[in-house]
Amino acid sequence: MTGERDNNGVVGVGADLDSLFAEVEALRELASDSDKARDSARVYDFGIRWGALLSGRLQRLAHYHHRGELTPHEQARYEKLRTELRDVQPLAERLGIARPTIPLEDRR
């Protein structure tokens, strides 16, 4: 699994990061509105999108991170994303949606 590269790193990494950051914000919004959070159809629809992003785009980012193929800017955004995912984990658990399967803590 190797990605196409351009002068700014692996193609699509920026879009992956943008999508994940947007969904983290959508998760916060959904969880903060008690009416929306009780709407099982809305939570289900969100959970499908969320799960697809976690199992697709997030796994792809983790792969390139592990291989050291992210640019310094992408790496910084990836680390911020991991922090954001740690922060919203209780919200995901409360809504009963998927949790990230990548390590969210630094391995020392």
Image (cartoon, helix red, strand yellow):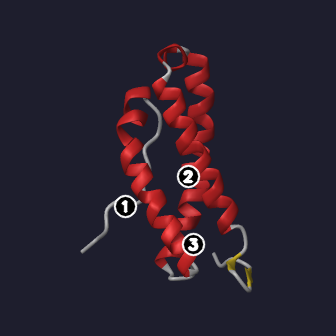
Q: Is residue 3 above or below residue 83?
A: below
- The secondary structure type at the circle numbered 3 is helix
Q: Is residue 17 left or right of residue 5?
A: left
Residue marked by disc 1: 103
Per the image, label 2 sits on a secondary structure element best described as: helix
In space, the residues marked 1 and 2 are separated at their CA atoms by: 13 Å
Dot 2 amino acid type: Ser
Residue type marked 1: Pro
Q: Nearer the viewer, mark 3 or mark 1?
A: 3
Residue 98 horizontal side relative to residue 19, left or right: left
8, above or below 102, in the image: below
Between disc 1 and disc 2, the foreground one is: 1
For the point 43% across and 58% down, the residue is: 82
Name the quarter where the C terminus is drawn. bottom left
Q: Amino acid at mark 3?
A: Glu
Q: Position of residue 8 (x, y in %)?
A: 70, 81
Q: How many tags in the picture?
A: 3
Residue under the point 47% across and 16% down: 34
Q: Indicate the quadrant where residue 64 lies.
A: bottom right
Where residue 74 sits: x, y (%)? 57, 72
In the structure shown, which secondary structural element does the residue marked by tag 1 occupy? Answer: loop
Mark earlier in primary sequence (1, 2): 2
Please name whichever residue, 46 or 32, is drawn nearer the observer in this view of the structure.
32
Evaluate if marks 1 and 2 touch, with contact meaning CB atoms under 8 Å apart: no
Quickly name the residue at label 2: 55
Q: Which residue is mark 3?
A: 74
Residue at (53% x, 28% y) in the render: 30
